[in-house]
Image (cartoon, grey):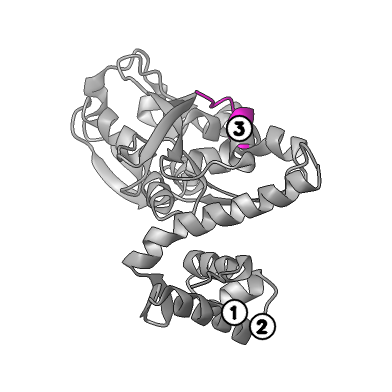
Amino acid sequence: MMNNISPRQLEVFVQIALLGSVRGAAERLYLTQPAASMALAELERQLDAPLFARERGRLRLNPRGRELLPLAQELLERHAEFGRRGREEGDALSGELRIGASNTVGNYRVGELLGEFVRAQPQVAIRLRVANTDTIAAAMLDHSLDLGCVEGPVTHPQLEVRPWRDDLLVVCAPPDHPLARRRGLKPADFAGARWVMREPGSATRATSERVLSQLPPGETVLELDQIEAIKQAVIAGLGIACLPQVAVTDALATGRLKALKTPFLDLRRKLSMLVHRQKYRGALLDAFIAQAGLER
């Protein structure tokens, strides 16, 4: 039987997989909803198998769909590359790159992560998703992101972890806090301290817990899912917190926060890039990896 699967059908399949609905895919591809539905129905007819299961009005990939998604993405990338080379556009890249960044990177190091590439490749659309490390790793595994940049350790056989930058956390307190006024702090001084923490699943939370295990027991008074919210809570005197240095430079400079001197704590960590081992690396992803200095 002749295979008549078209790039348009593959595009519809990929966008429905990423967005969870035919309507979302139709809008993204500038199609009518019936045209997108028809493209999916025709693809499933040619494959003689459904690719999605319906769950509460959303379309979720079934096992067959999950297996075919990276292949469909690869075919579309190769199709775009064929056109580019055919037109002899050389280095002018176009297309879309979906990058996930955990909170510290997405909110405070975005220029460092994307700036050079965006300036060098103005035709490339970058979609940046900011979430905690666990969420980014999960999105990498279901192929809804091309690349992840995280601050936490990730161990999964399908994900390759490449070191990107060194990062440092600092223990912060409001300037009038008893610990901020004390000279020569010792671990014992932290007994009963009130801590403001990130939510479970975030790398800052994991590092904070590692740090707290080296100190006498304290109390977690608040759990927040944004670094900015934690900063404001500490400034307001609600507790102390372990925060990325890049996130508090301004507050330290203006004296709204004080960094506690804790040479007895190891507050260093590595920021890393996640690359899916099974993912096809087209010219776009290769160029980004090269620009970020991540080539092996």
Task: Say what secondary structure mark 2 lies in.
Answer: loop
Q: Which residue in the structure is indicated by mark 1?
A: 36
Q: Position of residue 241 (x, y in %)?
A: 38, 36
Left or right: 53 with respect to 146? Answer: left
Q: Nearer the viewer, mark 3 or mark 1?
A: 1
Q: Position of residue 253 (x, y in %)?
A: 60, 27
Task: Say what secondary structure mark 3 lies in.
Answer: helix
Q: Are the residues at dot 3 and dot 1 in contact (C-beta closer than 8 Å)?
A: no
Q: Sequence order check: which comes first, mark 3 or mark 1?
A: 1
Q: Is residue 53 visible?
A: yes
Q: Are the residues at dot 1 and dot 2 in contact (C-beta closer than 8 Å)?
A: yes
Residue segment shown in magenta: 288-296
Closest to the observer, 246 or 41: 41
Exactly how many numbered labels are in the figure? 3
Work out which residue is located at the far front of the displayed protein and give it.
Answer: 1
Determine the residue positioned at 47% across, 25% down: 167
Determine the residue positioned at 58% across, 33% down: 289
Which amino acid is tagged 3? Asp
Task: Say what secondary structure mark 1 lies in.
Answer: helix
Instruction: Calculate the distance from the C-alpha at mark 3 to the C-alpha at mark 1.
Output: 48 Å
Q: Is residue 52 magenta?
A: no
Left or right: 295 with respect to 126? Answer: left
Choose top left, top right, bottom left or bottom right for residue 243.
Answer: top left
Residue 32: which disc? 2
Q: Which residue in the structure is indicated by mark 3?
A: 250
How packed mark 2 is, by other alpha carbons closer than 10 Å (few <14, some 14-19, many 20 or more), is some
Instruction: Calculate the distance from the C-alpha at mark 3 to the C-alpha at mark 2.
Output: 48 Å
Q: Is residue 173 visible?
A: no
Q: Position of residue 185 (x, y in %)?
A: 32, 17
Q: Classify 166 as above or below 118.
A: above
Determine the residue positioned at 64% across, 69% down: 28
